[in-house]
Image (cartoon, grey):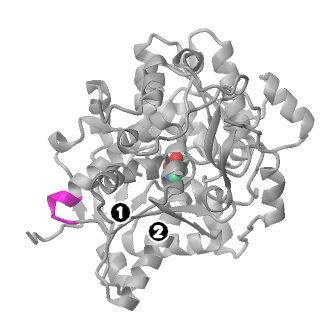
Amino acid sequence: MSKEIPYKIYLEEQEMPKAWYNLRADMINKPAPLLNPGTLKPMTAEELSAVFCDELVKQELDNDTRFIEIPEEIRNFYKMYRPSPLVRAYCLEKKLGTPAKIYYKFEGNNTSGSHKLNSAIAQAYYAKKQGLKGVTTETGAGQWGTALSMACSYFDLDCKVFMVKVSYEQKPFRREVMRTYGASVTPSPSMETNVGKKINAEHPGTTGSLGCAISEAVEVAVGTPGYRYVLGSVLNQVLLHQSVIGLEAKAALDKYGEKADIIIGCAGGGSNLGGLIAPFMGEKIQKGTDYRIIAVEPASCPSLTRGKYAYDFCDTGMVCPLAKMYTLGSDFIPAPNHAGGLRYHGMSSVLSQLYDDGLMEATTAKQTEVFQAAETFARVEGILPAPESSHAIKVAIDEALKCKETGEEKTIVFGLTGTGYFDLVAYEKFHDGKMDDYIPTDEELAKYAAKLPKVEL
Ligand SMILES: *Cc1c(COP(=O)(O)O)cnc(C)c1O
């Protein structure tokens, strides 16, 4: 059994997953359905088809099909940058002096710099197959917009990105990568949409939010013939596509007879974590395997740990369906100095349900301790991690240090979702001691929670 484990476990091309795993098929309590904000009835396929492509609507609503085939064109695209390595963090283990084995699944090895390309390519493929002309979307930190622009250029689709204004101004390089791949990039809130004009009028000088950019992108998609909207996280379909991360990770561990004890991921909208844990959680539900699964969110945007489990709007403009999720309220805007991209007010319905069922844990990390962990990691493992990913690093290090105290040889697997080359302003603030750890007060959170829509079912 005990083959020597290499630094990087790569699967062979022919060992890559041929189907996505739909965890919902194995969930006892299914995630709550999206609701029509007008009627408060579950959104029908027909209603959703005005916003999303048909095949993606099917995937969104499918709580039953366990495996959904990955079309060959998508698999071929995946082959350009996948399989991604499962890295044994020997150097980090040594540095920490821990008996724990630490692995990370590295998704930053593509130009978009994150896991988001896994779903972008799928969504672009189905849009093209339906004969659409283009897609619209929002982007916060810019990773999703970059991934989508790469996917759209591959399939020759128009790509219109509403980029949160503060990022548009602070991250001009991301913007230029998107334009290189042919996307048009508009700072949000803009004056191109009704919702953008309204938000600009109500909050002059606002630097925008993801929720607001979503409203703008949806408005343009619904109002432009041949266009649909695509979203980079939160939705069931995105978690489905991201299951390639977990399927590959599990196959790589299985190859060496390794079993994970603790699985850790950062959680913004929940897509990388949902994808990473999918096959492990499926096994936990079906066979009772004792995987400890931990979501890590920023202390400044703590939707799972301090939010309410309730129906809420997915966007600020309230044009999108209502989703039942752990949420801070759709007009919650996290502290502007927060460096990472984990700024969404809600959490995927799938993860919210699993968390509510006690099948996974959640914890928060403060910004400065996250950057401290990022630096520790970079100095021994070489990779410059994205601030988002570094939330997972922080908790993986904490767990490894606990093992050092107890002498337990646990196997820890975490998701290293991306690289941080475009986040160097945040690193600069950290190095200059100018980064703070803003944590919202209970009063502040209560103010937003009080505005949650009243949905009686
Ligand atoms: C977008 C992003 C995240 C958070 O999104 P999830 O949907 O929660 O996965 C995490 N890491 C990186 C690098 C990202 O780009």
Residue 78 in magenta stretch: no
Element carrying mark 2: helix
Where are the magenta residues, as a range?
253-258
| Any part of residue 122 in sight | yes
Image coordinates for residue 29, horizontal then vertical, percent: 46, 45
Residue 334 lies left or right of residue 16; in this view the side is right
Residue holding disc 2: 393
Amino acid residing under circle 1: Tyr
Element carrying mark 1: strand
Give me the C-alpha separation between circle 1 and circle 2: 9 Å
Quadrant in the picture for residue 207: top right
Image coordinates for residue 390, horizontal then vertical, percent: 51, 65
Quadrant in the picture for residue 242: top left
Mark 1: few/some/many CA within 10 Å (<14, 14-19, 20+): many
Q: Is residue 51 above or below residue 259?
A: above
Quadrant in the picture for residue 311: top right
Residue sitting at x 54%, y 43%: 349
Q: Is residue 173 above or below residue 320?
A: below
* In the foreground, 385 or 115: 115
Mark 2: few/some/many CA within 10 Å (<14, 14-19, 20+): many
What's the mark number on residue 329? none
Residue holding disc 1: 104
Label 1 close to label 2 by CB (< 8 Å): yes
Amino acid residing under circle 2: Ile
* In the foreground, 431 or 128: 128
Q: Quadrant of the C terminus?
A: top right
Q: Is residue 203 above or below residue 273?
A: above
Q: How many marks?
A: 2
Residue 408 lies left or right of residue 185; in this view the side is left
Image coordinates for residue 16, horizontal then vertical, percent: 22, 42
Residue sitting at x 66%, y 66%: 299
* In the foreground, 229 or 37: 37
